[in-house]
Image (cartoon, rainbow, N blue to C red):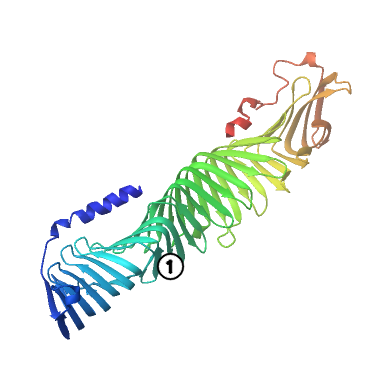
């Protein structure tokens, strides 16, 4: 890409090379003029308020030596080249070739072109190509912008600067560090052709290729771009970022990392509205939440993250369509999930299902309360249905309008079932032998769990209970209405790779 820029630059300046031609140098003024035989019979010595002209360009100096035959002259002291109405060059020493229209300037060199000022100790200027070159450190200032580089080129006709090696740009609100940078001063555009970092108070941006509009403050970064602040990191193949609005868009192989919450999201497209405290990711999305006890893996079609604009703390997370998550002790799926950080509650909607080892929990809605990175309780309503595989055969089942499960160490301790409560329970002796299948109904039930199995049930109001020997069960009688075992839908660890 660097070679491409050089070729492009040469091509552009090559288009004006046809203007090159020999023209006369006119001596317009000198307080004193004579010939210095020591320098040759064709060399004039001009002293005091020297003014010379070639074409429309004027040359000023305190004194000069001019060779009429070679059209080469040296200017000394207070050198000033007035290139045109907008461009002026100053130095202490000038060497100029009138045939090639090529100038060398030494010591305290200053080029001024409208609001652009170039300063260096040594510079060449090609009048034909309108090209100023400094090979050893130069500084360009333009209004409130300052750019420094080891090497640089400036085209005064198209108002473009080419910076090379150790480029550093400083502005009131940001700083740019680059390997190769092209600055179009007319359009206030900066183009990057090497590793480039943009620093501001809120963020740090990095890319290997791109551009930055200094007026709109819109940046485009490519070839693995990053956007970083103290708490978050965004990485993508391509990224747009507008500092004024705080808007960022990332495309292809996007990674969002929250170092405070130890969370990572990956996808193919993301947007962030910094000033609104909102971020969105979609397309092949995967998320990883690194907890102390385990890692939570999740996926969905689209995820929105809402955060505090002052502290960057996450406040809410919303996931939509094909939501699935996996942790070693719990798995789940639904079509809509909302996590509110303030009350530490996960809201699952649209056919939510939770699996905890051999237990399956479903309802129209499920709310999960979290405390210290562990499940504290789970509210299932309406049409709550809990299915648990018996240790040997069959399924224990709990059904009701609303069921609340209370956890201890991420295991269900007891259940509170209210509203048309029903259970089917495979009652076994201590040795595991089947006593019978218990069918019960009541208004309210409290179900105790021990070793992940039902150990005791207490019934309240409108109680009905029947114990059947297994051989007396009719076809499908051992299933409550609405029973559906969905183990084949349970997320697996490999689904999130």
Please give the name of the residue rendered at 88% of the width and 22% of the height, measured from the top-left corner: 429
Occupied quadrant, residue 32: bottom left
Please give the name of the residue rendered at 76% of the width and 16% of the height, measured from the top-left corner: 473
All told, the count of numbered labels is 1
Asked whether residue 122 appears in the rendered view, the answer is yes
| Along the line of sight, the residue nearer the viewer: 380 or 210 | 210
Q: Is residue 340 above or below residue 448?
A: below
- Give the left or right position of residue 65, taking residue 21 as reference: right
| Along the line of sight, the residue nearer the viewer: 483 or 27 | 27
Dot 1: what SS?
loop
Q: Is residue 377 above or below residue 486?
A: below
Badge 1 is on which residue? 171
Asked whether residue 115 appears in the rendered view, the answer is no
> Residue 264: x percent and y percent?
58, 45
- Give the left or right position of residue 85, taking residue 290 as reference: left
| Along the line of sight, the residue nearer the viewer: 121 or 31 | 31
Occupied quadrant, residue 438: top right
- Which residue is situated farthest in the top direction here? 471
- Which residue is situated farthest in the bottom direction here? 31
């Amino acid at each position: 890409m660097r070679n491409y820029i050089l070729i492009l630059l040469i091509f552009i300046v090559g288009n004006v090379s046809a203007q090159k031609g020999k023209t006369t140098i006119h001596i317009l003024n000198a307080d004193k003029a004579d010939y210095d035989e020591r320098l040759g019979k064709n060399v004039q010595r001009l002293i005091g308020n020297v003014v010379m002209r070639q074409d429309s360009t004027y040359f000023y100096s305190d004194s000069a030596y001019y060779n009429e035959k070679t059209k080469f002259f040296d200017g000394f002291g207070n050198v000033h080249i007035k290139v045109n109405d907008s461009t002026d060059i100053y130095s202490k020493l000038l060497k100029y070739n009138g045939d090639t229209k090529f100038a060398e300037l030494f010591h305290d060199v200053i080029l001024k072109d409208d609001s652009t000022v170039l300063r260096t100790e040594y510079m060449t200027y090609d009048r034909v190509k309108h090209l100023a070159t400094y090979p050893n450190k130069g500084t360009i200032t333009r209004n409130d912008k300052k750019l420094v580089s080891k090497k640089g080129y400036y085209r005064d006709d198209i108002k473009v600067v080419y910076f090379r090696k150790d480029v550093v740009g400083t502005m009131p609100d940001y700083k740019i560090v680059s390997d190769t940078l092209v600055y179009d001063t007319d359009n206030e555009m900066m183009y990057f052709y090497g590793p480039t970092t943009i620093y501001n108070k809120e963020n740090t941006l990095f890319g290997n290729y791109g551009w930055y509009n200094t007026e709109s403050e819109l940046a485009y970064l490519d070839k693995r771009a990053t956007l970083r602040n103290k708490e978050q990191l965004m990485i993508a193949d391509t990224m747009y970022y507008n500092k004024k609005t705080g808007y960022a868009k990332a495309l292809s192989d996007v990674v969002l990392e929250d170092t405070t919450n130890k969370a990572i999201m990956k996808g193919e497209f993301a947007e962030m509205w910094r000033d609104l405290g909102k971020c969105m990711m979609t397309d092949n999305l995967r998320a990883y939440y690194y907890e102390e006890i385990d890692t939570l893996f999740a996926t969905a079609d689209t995820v929105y993250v809402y955060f505090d604009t002052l502290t960057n703390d996450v406040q809410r997370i919303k996931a939509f369509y094909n939501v699935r998550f996996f942790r070693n002790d719990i798995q789940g799926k639904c079509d809509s999930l909302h996590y509110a950080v303030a009350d530490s509650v996960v809201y699952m909607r649209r056919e939510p299902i939770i699996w905890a080892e051999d237990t399956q929990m479903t309802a129209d809605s499920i709310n999960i309360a979290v405390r210290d990175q562990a499940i504290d309780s789970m509210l299932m309503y309406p049409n709550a249905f809990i299915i648990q595989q018996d240790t040997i055969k069959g399924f224990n089942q709990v059904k009701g309008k609303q069921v609340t499960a209370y956890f201890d160490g991420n295991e269900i301790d007891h259940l509170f079932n209210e509203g048309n409560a029903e259970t089917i329970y495979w009652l076994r002796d201590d040795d595991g032998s089947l006593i019978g299948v218990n069918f019960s109904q009541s208004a309210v039930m409290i179900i105790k769990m021990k070793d992940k199995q039902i150990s005791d049930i207490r019934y309240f109001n409108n109680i009905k209970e029947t114990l059947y020997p297994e051989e007396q069960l009719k076809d499908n009688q051992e299933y409550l209405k609405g029973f559906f075992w969905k183990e084949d839908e349970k997320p697996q660890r490999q689904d999130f790779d």
